[in-house]
Image (spheres, rainbow, N blue to C red):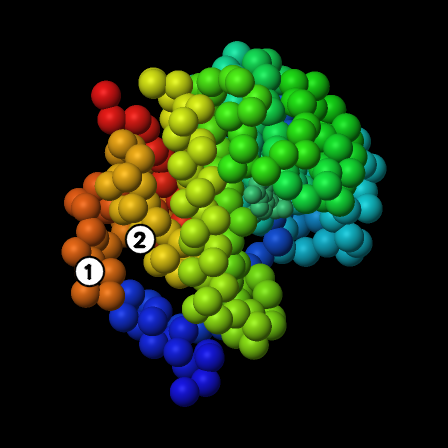
Amino acid sequence: MSNKKFFEERYAKLGWKFKYVKPKQAIRINTMNIAEEKVVNRLEALKIKLEKVPFLEHGYWVHHSEFSLGATSEYLLGLYSIQEAAAQIPATLFTELKNKVVLDACAAPGGKTVQLADLMQNTGVIIALDVKKERLTAMANHLERCHVKNTIIYNLDARHASKLKLKFDCILLDVPCSGNFSTDKQWFRKRTIKDIERNAKLQREIMTEAAKILKDDGEMIYSTCSLEPEENELNINWAIENLNLKVAKIDCYGENTSTKIFGKQLDNQIENCRRIWPGKTQGFFVCKLKKVA
Ligand SMILES: C[S@@+](CC[C@H](N)C(=O)[O-])C[C@H]1O[C@@H](n2cnc3c(N)ncnc32)[C@H](O)[C@@H]1O
């Protein structure tokens, strides 16, 4: 059986019929730097055709632009970020971010760090980690361009985040994952179940460390752009069983996840997670975790 067929059959078992999709390009307005209406008017004056994304507060799909969206003066001034629509969801799921102590544990190249800073209107503090030093320069440039003032960057493995000796109100775990075919044309050629299991293990290790440094009343958002249950529902089920965490209800775009995966019955709380199959957006998975009191 071809690798593609193998994965297509897994998706069918999860209730989704495979189809090729190309996610639309999207932007997010950095409202800490400008009133949304002003930048939308400026972009429309440049003949950029925008459509408000119905499930996002500050996101727009870009239907037409005569030039690269990374080449406008509005982009260079940090008035908007180029950020895929599903990727704009996780940061919006925290109950409160202003004046909080926030950890962005796998942060480079900083798309969600900038969004967190925007939602915080540059208050509080964000500690942004990434294990890959070479990705930090791009992230620092990105934060500077967008006028982020509340963020400290560390080149640190999230599995050692307790070295920071801090406790966090909010932790974003946008974990390294296997990705999906909608954003990577070579996906079916290069990905194997072994990669998925290796990433799932790394994700569990990152979650384990994060659970130790989350305040008792804190919130943790876990997200991946993987379609594979080992990195999503099955990992969250493991966290419920092993890390004294529960899954809180969220209200966002996507489907409630199934509590039965490949014949295995999972904890009922798993239905509070959201799965987004590729379509209008790329594929995505997101959930909110809290400590069990
Ligand atoms: C999905 S990307 C993050 C994207 C980022 N949150 C954004 O919105 O721009 C995952 C990141 O995790 C980083 N990473 C991989 N292993 C890590 C680890 N053990 N600790 C911290 N970061 C890690 C990768 O270098 C990569 O930059």
Neighbourhood count class around disc 2 (C-alpha, 10 Å): few under 14, some 14–19, many 20 upward: many
**Residue in front for this viewpoint, 112 or 243:** 243
x, y percent for residue 263:
19, 65
Looking at this rendering, what residue extends furthest in the bottom direction? 1
Asked if 238 appears above or below 42 in the picture, the reply is below
Please state, as top left, top right, bottom left or bottom right, where the C terminus lies in the image.
top left
Q: Quadrant of residue 120?
A: top right
Amino acid marked by disc 1: Lys
> Is there any visible trace of residue 172 in the rendered image?
yes
The residue singled out by tag 1 in the image is 264
Point 27% across, 46% down: residue: 237
Point 24% across, 60% down: residue: 261
The residue singled out by tag 2 in the image is 234
- Is disc 1 in contact with disc 2, using a CB cutoff of under 8 Å? yes
Please state, as top left, top right, bottom left or bottom right, where the N terminus lies in the image.
bottom left
**Residue in front for this viewpoint, 233 or 278:** 233
Looking at the rendered structure, the secondary structure element under dot 2 is helix
x, y percent for residue 216:
34, 18
Along the horizontal axis of the image, is 125 left or right of 92?
right
The residues bearing labels 1 and 2 have C-alpha atoms spaced at a distance of: 9 Å
Amino acid marked by disc 2: Leu
Along the horizontal axis of the image, is 161 left or right of 218?
right
**Residue in front for this viewpoint, 111 or 235:** 235
Looking at the rendered structure, the secondary structure element under dot 1 is strand
Q: Quadrant of ligand 1?
A: top right
- Work out whether mark 1 precedes mark 2 in sequence or the reverse, and give the earlier one: 2
Point 48% across, 49% down: residue: 202
Asked if 96 appears above or below 229 in the picture, the reply is above
x, y percent for residue 100:
50, 15
